[in-house]
Amino acid sequence: MSDAPKTSGMTRLRNYFLTGFVVCAPLAITAYIAWSFIGWVDSWVKPYIPARYNPDSYLPAPVPGFGLIVALILITLIGFLTANIVGRAIVLFGERLLGRMPLVRGVYGSLKQIFETVLSNKGNMFRQVGLVEYPRKGVWSLVFVASEKETEINQKLDQEDNPLIAVFMPCTPNPTTGFLMYVPKSDVVLLDMTIEDGAKLIVSAGLVAPEVKTKMVTLNGKPIGVQIANPPVGAGPQPARKSRTASSRPNK
């Protein structure tokens, strides 16, 4: 009799701890990442700020985030100058110089193309989330479907009415690494979830799954929440049943 309240109390304490951990852990990790990023930017920018403009020279304690503010202002100013004709000419001249360096031009060109694709409003990184049977039959992996573009790979390997499409299969829990694969379009099962939901599913290792929305099917203009099953193959049209009313039944 005495063990029941003690067990119940320990269970409640455990539930309270887990609830607090779920609330505090994301906040703590987010604050740690933000603080580390601010410190990393400050360590790069502050050494180049003149002492008379650096508030750390006048205050007894360093000011965190001042280097980040200076970096944001400089990046915005560079973007403003690059939008002008003179700034664009300077950038093109610098790119021509980099293009003459054998090793640097490859790194710079690849990074520039990646950042333009990611940050540009015109570029679409991925179109849709899909499933591909990998690494064997019966085992499905989540992939991001890239835009369908005509490449040399398509010209050499495409089959009639079944072109190859580029898919990126990310690794869990780091979606920035993975495998680029070209698979037939018929082998990709497209999903309705968004790219953000797919990324959450990968980062959480399947723990955070998007909610499934039941598709509504209309029947005579009225939506219903279940799928309408097709009649069995070979079954002909069902004859209409004749119903009898109480007045039409024969009197016994």
Image (cartoon, helix red, strand yellow):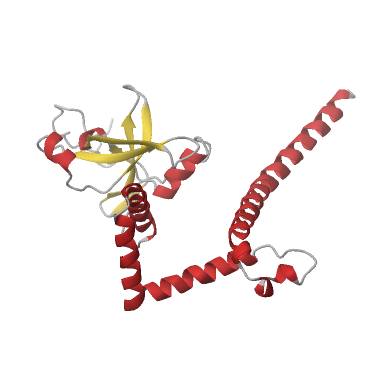
Q: Is residue 185 left or right of residue 143?
A: left
Q: Residue at x 67, y 43 (%)?
A: 22
Quadrant (top left/top right/bottom left/bottom right) for the N terminus: top right
The correct choice, above or below, for 245 with respect to 37 in the image is above
Residue 212 visible to an observer of this rendering: no
Give the total of numbered labels: 0
Quadrant (top left/top right/bottom left/bottom right) for the C terminus: top left
Q: Is residue 184 left or right of residue 222?
A: left
Residue 100 visible to an observer of this rendering: yes
Q: Is residue 160 left or right of residue 90?
A: left
Residue 79 position within the rendered picture, expressed as x and y whole percent measured from the top left: 42, 71
Q: Identify the residue at the far right of this view.
A: 2
Q: Residue at x 86, y 24 (%)?
A: 3
Q: Is residue 241 left or right of residue 125?
A: left
The correct choice, above or below, for 177 with respect to 196 in the image is above
Front residue of 194 and 118: 118
Q: Residue at x 71, y 38 (%)?
A: 18
The correct choice, above or below, for 63 with respect to 9 in the image is below
Residue 121 position within the rendered picture, expressed as x and y whole percent measured from the top left: 35, 63
Q: Identify the residue at the far left of this view.
A: 160
Residue 148 position within the rendered picture, expressed as x and y whole percent measured from the top left: 22, 47
Q: Residue at x 16, y 28 (%)?
A: 235
Residue 38 position within the rendered picture, expressed as x and y whole percent measured from the top left: 62, 58
The correct choice, above or below, for 56 with respect to 21 in the image is below
